[in-house]
Amino acid sequence: MELGVRAQRKEPELDILDPKNGITTKQLINNYVSAHFKVKIDGKPAKINFLGFEKEDISFVSYLEIENVKKLKTIEVFVDFVTEIHDDQSNLVHVTYKAPIKSARLSREITSEIFTFGAK
């Protein structure tokens, strides 16, 4: 992710965990996520709230939510975190809407997934 953030900001020496000039790691990751993660609910773009992140070993786990979703039939998720830089990387996406949780592994070749839910 650091390489992706560096490319996005055109700052090849940027340290994502210790940014300078009043920028925080959370801001950097939020901006990167906003550019590389999109969601459509029933075909319409959704407003995504970035809740935060955790660093786990060599990975970042980002927490996002879409509020006030009453009913839906489909959620389309597009994500190309890191895969725009490294073709051997992938992104694991979990969608929580009622039950069970649905998941997909997205890659450079497959950047989006449509999750279908029964109408209730």
Image (cartoon, rainbow, N blue to C red):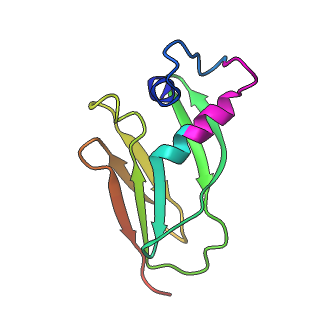
Residue extending furthest toward the front: 10
Q: Is residue 118 above or below residue 108?
A: below
Q: Is residue 80 above or below residue 75?
A: above
Q: Is residue 100 left or right of residue 105?
A: right
Residue 19 in picture, x, y percent from top left: 66, 19
Where residue 16 sits, quadrant-wise, is top right
Residue 81 in picture, x, y percent from top left: 43, 39
Residue sitting at x 63%, y 20%: 17
> Closer to the camera, 53 or 7?
7
Q: Is residue 27 above or below residue 104?
A: above
> Closer to the camera, 116 or 49?
49
Q: Which residues are magenta?
A: 19-31
Residue sitting at x 53%, y 62%: 96
Res. 105 in view: yes
Residue sitting at x 46%, y 45%: 36
Q: Is residue 3 above or below residue 75?
A: above
Residue extending furthest toward the top: 13
Q: Is residue 67 left or right of residue 79?
A: right
Q: Disc count in the image?
A: 0
